Amino acid sequence: MFKKVLIVEDLDSIIETVRHTLEKLSIKNIQYAKYCDEALIKIKKAQIEKDPFELLISDLSFKEDHRENKLKNGEELIRTVKNIQPEIKTIVFSIEDKSFKIHSLFEILEINAYVIKGRNSIKDLKKAVQETYNNKTKILLPETSTNSVNKNSLIEIESYDIELLKLLSNGYIINEIAIKFKNLQIQPNSNSSIEKRINKLKTYFKANNNVHLIAITKDLGLI
Amino acid sequence: MFKKVLIVEDLDSIIETVRHTLEKLSIKNIQYAKYCDEALIKIKKAQIEKDPFELLISDLSFKEDHRENKLKNGEELIRTVKNIQPEIKTIVFSIEDKSFKIHSLFEILEINAYVIKGRNSIKDLKKAVQETYNNKTKILLPETSTNSVNKNSLIEIESYDIELLKLLSNGYIINEIAIKFKNLQIQPNSNSSIEKRINKLKTYFKANNNVHLIAITKDLGLI
DNA sequence: GATTTTTTTACGGGAAACCGTAAAGAAGTG
DNA sequence: CACTTCTTTACGGTTTCCCGTAAAAAAATC
């Protein structure tokens, strides 16, 4: 079993339970960090001291408080950590159950497992740690991930669309978005094409108008 | 100290810690429920058996799963419980930190304490339980509730505004909203007045247009 | 009950969204 | 390179939003 594990989680009420779960798996060296920046420092230090962490268990979203943090969420943390220590194993432990986000974490960050916080997640987390240790990958627990959008149906939404939706939600009008895209050399960037793209998104998400579209995509966690 | 307490929380990773915290306070009879409906049944049963719960510690939001639940969140649970057992003490333990919501819970449901889940919430929860036992009311922990909207500034947003924003976010156009309000006999209900009200909200939230307004109010958790 | 004040409604004009059609351009194919 | 296909852009008409002004109605004040 793993010898050295780092838990990154802001809620103290969850840290305790995770630590307890890992102790039962006979993991001796269990450390934790309540901030992503703090976690990165610990990982760097362990690496320098030639005693690196073997497993990183991280949440995705973190509360903001008085402390200024460079890394704002678990996604950024994992990306940074994988740059300096590519062989580290990673498990995401989050309440987020939107499949397109989970999917992107496996694809882009190549995480080893994803455990959705829920009514029986302690058992799931335990299983995820064991299977990750046995070099199994792409574990998604619980497998019956309900009330989230179909994975396949969201694959076709590109970063262009996300950017477009974000600008809309920030109060930009189409003409302003066109100018912005031209400046950033993002194509297509004509008013007409942008309108068409928004139209596609409205059909896709069954939205009556732009307001409705933003409400839906915000609920989905897309933006 | 309390003798009989019920914890209502869907995340098993949090239940364990709360239970542990209460045990340290020498509370002997600690029970839990992962669903609101389940919690209500336990409370009713305890009352019938003349051994009622003295304290209810509940989360606000619960994940939906295969089980059908009449009570969808902690707010509905507390409202129902207070109807059948008005003297019960209640503590809300939630990650929600939007002050207008917290405020309404104190005002409308007359909860005894509110603890925001965070990096030091175990200590806060312990304190809240002790102070609630000593008949203190309106305990809000942590006291320095940051990054939430000013309480006073949100008081003037009425249920009319919320209803209006919800209809907008559901894709209704102004004319449709006017018709709906006329049917429901909600006033004002003319296109012009509704426009004016939206305008007020846009000024208030510094929104450039309706899309922006819905994005902002969704982020605030207002709708 | 006449007055001021506030709220609600009506209306009109310009801006932006909405929606279809068609032209221009880019990419792929034989 | 001629042809098809797909993408991007242009444009015009209709609807809705947006914003101001003014009238009508309701409420408050004296």
Image (spheres, coloured by chain):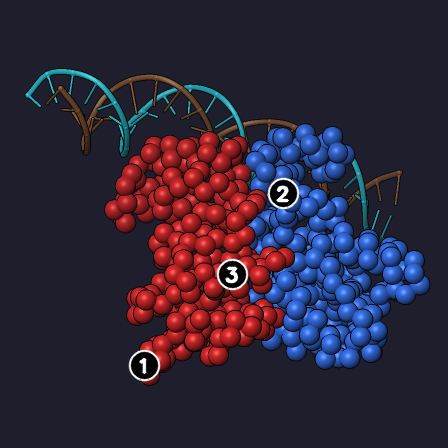
Chain colours: A red, B blue, C brown, D cyan
Residue at mark 3 shares a chain with residue at mark 1: yes
For marks 3 and 1 on the same chain, the one whose residue lies earlier in the sequence? 1
**Residue B92: x percent and y percent?**
72, 64
Of A119 and B185, the residue lying toward us: A119
Instruction: Chain letter for mark 2, please.
Output: B
Q: Which residue is mark 3?
A: A127
**Could you tell me if the residues under marks 3 and 1 are in contact, i.e. CB atoms within 8 Å?**
no
Residue located at (45% from left, 60% from top): A131
Residue B166's label in the rendered image is 2
Q: Above or below — where is C16 with respect to A104?
A: above
Q: Which residue is mark 1?
A: A50
Q: Above or below — where is B135 with respect to A216?
A: below
Residue located at (47% from left, 57% from top): A114
Q: Is residue B105 left or right of residue A68?
A: right
Of B84 and A219, the residue lying toward us: B84
Q: Give the class, few, some or many, for how many residues have Cα within 10 Å of label 3's Cα (few <14, many ≥20).
A: some
Q: Amino acid at mark 3?
A: Lys
Q: Is residue A65 visible?
A: no
**Residue A180: x percent and y percent?**
32, 47
* Badge 2 element: helix
**Residue B193: x percent and y percent?**
65, 38
Instruction: Chain letter for mark 1, please.
Output: A
Q: Above or below — where is A145 with respect to B100?
A: above
Kindly indicate the quadrant of the structure image that contains residue C2: top right
Q: Is residue A80 left or right of residue A117?
A: left
Instruction: Tell me the distance, in whole angstroms, between the alpha carbons under discs 3 and 2.
Output: 41 Å
